[in-house]
Amino acid sequence: MEENLRKKLESGPLNFESYFSQKALGMKASEIRELLKLVETSNVISLAGGLPNPKTFPIDILKEILEEVITEHADKALQYGTTKGFTPLRLAIAKWLRKRYDIPTSKVDIMITSGSQQALDLIGRVFIDPGDIVVVEAPTYLAALQAFSFYEPTYIQIPLDDEGMKTDVLEERLRKLKAEGKKVKLVYTVPTFQNPAGVTMAEERRKHLIELASEFDFIIVEDDPYGELRYSGKPVPKVKALDDEGRVLYLGTFSKILSPGFRLGWIAGEPHFIRKLEIAKQSVDLCTNAFGQVVAWRYLDGGHLERHIPKIIEFYKPRRDAMLDALERYMPEGVRWTRPEGGMFVWVTLPENINATAMLERAVAKGVAYVPGEAFYAHRDVKNTMRLNFTYVDEAQIEEGIKRLAETIKELL
Amino acid sequence: MEENLRKKLESGPLNFESYFSQKALGMKASEIRELLKLVETSNVISLAGGLPNPKTFPIDILKEILEEVITEHADKALQYGTTKGFTPLRLAIAKWLRKRYDIPTSKVDIMITSGSQQALDLIGRVFIDPGDIVVVEAPTYLAALQAFSFYEPTYIQIPLDDEGMKTDVLEERLRKLKAEGKKVKLVYTVPTFQNPAGVTMAEERRKHLIELASEFDFIIVEDDPYGELRYSGKPVPKVKALDDEGRVLYLGTFSKILSPGFRLGWIAGEPHFIRKLEIAKQSVDLCTNAFGQVVAWRYLDGGHLERHIPKIIEFYKPRRDAMLDALERYMPEGVRWTRPEGGMFVWVTLPENINATAMLERAVAKGVAYVPGEAFYAHRDVKNTMRLNFTYVDEAQIEEGIKRLAETIKELL
């Protein structure tokens, strides 16, 4: 036996790849994350991030809440929680959805998740069989593709314009699929201040989407991390608020309205769906951290959230304005961009002959970084787009960053 | 379109099952969790739990730490973290593993997970293809079976005795499998104060297991949530400390030595394995809650953990003793049980003709609850065992609970 061990040790390290599952062999690191690592270590103005600004974190409120939690609620905050989540928090969220979004919560159950990312993974786990057709926007949220792809769906991309997903194109595709005997299982949308494009789906399209769901029998995942961050324009009803049949799973998160540090999101939806998602969550992490849930409950139930949101908006609006102004001022002819009414991102479309992925190195050399748009398309078939973030850096940096970016583009024109 | 919607609404609710994935259709709720819900609402002494006692939570230390975290480390604690985890915490854990367990950490990387349960799910995701052979102890940790089973392994059960997994039986099985051209991918073990059986794998067997891993080329998952909770007997080296080849993935957790409320575990292992697990984690929850990680870092790095462990031991030891004493005093002939040197559980084996699952209702009527052992076997082929917890209820309740349990058993003999 010992001889055998010696032999193995002499034969060098393990053949690591030989132990991985087939799916693990295909797993690749997110390009954005790898890119961010590079940028963080240099002197570049990064418009590539996706982080909320730490200055929007309600630190003074949290000081009070933490004191209260450890003094009065330690028994709940420090123990294992139930898989579905801390009931007072679930009730407070239900109240928020009812009061603020007119979502009728009598037929809705709520499960707390470890961030919206976990909600996306659990939805993949519970709803997607290999080959199932999943509709996504083009472009769409990159990490949703990462989460769903593990479950091997077939993606259909539906283009966006300034009014969000083109539901007329979706309808056409649905009819064609039906004629072929095929069916869509799930439509994933970030309808409000979309990541990455910044656009918002118009009310008429939301209604149309709900009608299509009913006619063609699919479910809708409404991912809404940015909905509270509106800097201009008129509120639009949540897709979930238009949902009479229970087809919409609504995803919310505390990451942009409290802090990402507690890693808290939620799914609101039809109780039968929530029940299955709960069973799935049991086996992946048993429960979401109870401590953060009790903190979020005090934050929401104590009225702090409602009072804090206007401050976040006040902080981000000038940055959004600064970015749109700078784009207007510096960008050459032939470059187009979205004009978001809220959220964190502007989406830029370059002339078709410019490859934004290839251009990145040149831009970083000039001192500015962005996220090339390619990875936001399920089919990776569009090369001349990019995502710009306006929440993390300040106005002066935004102006300078856009100026550098415009110079980079001009050199290539 | 509207007519269509009306028609759908009139036709009643959705056919929920029709949307679920094939695997989701097979997902069932954990019996233990369902059982606990029942017991929590009645007047029963529950020896069925698996929770640490809230009196062991270091509330005064946490008060100080929370104050420090929100005052001095809010920027890290409230922001998104990296997928691999907060580096100062990872370094503090590495130091702990080196200093306290003699695990050589130069060739080891560490990733923070959302509890050990997430580590188990990620290991399934990264290592298990459908049909891969996974060896588990009989009995084994129920939620590990839940996590792995999603990835559809074929389980092989290896029996335990008072010295842990019978590695001679394992060797025999491995030789047989080899002769059939088959190979084990992974061996899962809770070698120290096992859940559910309470037994500890002897040092000789640990060495034997490592030798077998090398000879038969498999990896080992060493799940060690209870290792620090030793009430008697002599420490045994971690399996990971005997691992020269990088075959052992070591799982630790803060749930039993700080509090489960922060939902923090970790995987220590070969860097190539950790890298793949990190990529897998990206798509399931992006990162573990940063707030809890900063808290745990201050707890570990500030020396609080080292000072607090003896207090937890002091609190639990009399309860372990009370349970063993009561079993000795009340149990009839023919009933056997383990004598754990640490951890949270005693494993009871009834005469073969008594079905512990069927007996539960009678026991609850007598005012005591336990977890029937059946679900702890991958093949669910043993019916006369049960798990008893001694950490949650106090000594008087333990005595009374065991007395009631013994009465229930006597009635059936």
Image (spheres, coloured by chain):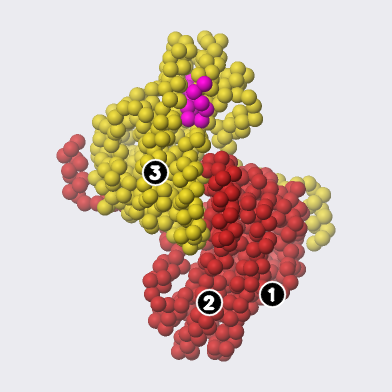
Chain colours: A red, B yellow
Mark 3 element type: helix
Residue at the disc numbered 1: A232
Mark nearer the N terminus (1 vs 2): 1
Is B165 on the left-hand or right-hand side of A203? left
Residue bearing mark 2? A394
For image coordinates 58% across by 77% down, the residue present is A319
Parent chain of label 2: A
* Residue at the spot of label 3: B305
* Labels 3 and 2 touching (C-beta < 8 A): no
* Magenta segment boundaries in residue numbering: B382-396
Disc 3 is attached to a residue of which chain?
Answer: B
Badge 1: chain ID: A
Is the N terminus of chain A in the top left, top right, bottom left or bottom right quadrant? top left
Q: Residue at x 54, y 12 (%)?
A: B407
Image marks 1 and 3: residues in contact by CB distance under 8 Å: no
Discs 1 and 3 share one subunit: no
Which label number is shown at residue A141? none
Residue B298 rendering spot, x and y as whole percentages: 41, 51
In front of the other: B358 or A63: A63
CA distance separating discs 3 and 2: 41 Å
Element type at marker 1?
loop
Residue B212 coordinates in the image, percent (x, y): 27, 37
* Badge 2 element: loop
Between residue A241 and residue B254, name the one nearer to us. B254
Q: Nearer the viewer, mark 3 or mark 2?
A: 3
Q: Nearer the viewer, mark 1 or mark 2?
A: 2
Q: Amino acid at mark 1?
A: Ser
Q: CA distance from mark 1 to mark 2?
A: 19 Å
Q: Amino acid at mark 2?
A: Asp
Identity of the residue drawn at 43% across and 37% down:
B154
Q: Are marks 1 and 2 on the same chain?
A: yes
Query: From the viewer's perspective, is A405 left or right of A2?
Result: right
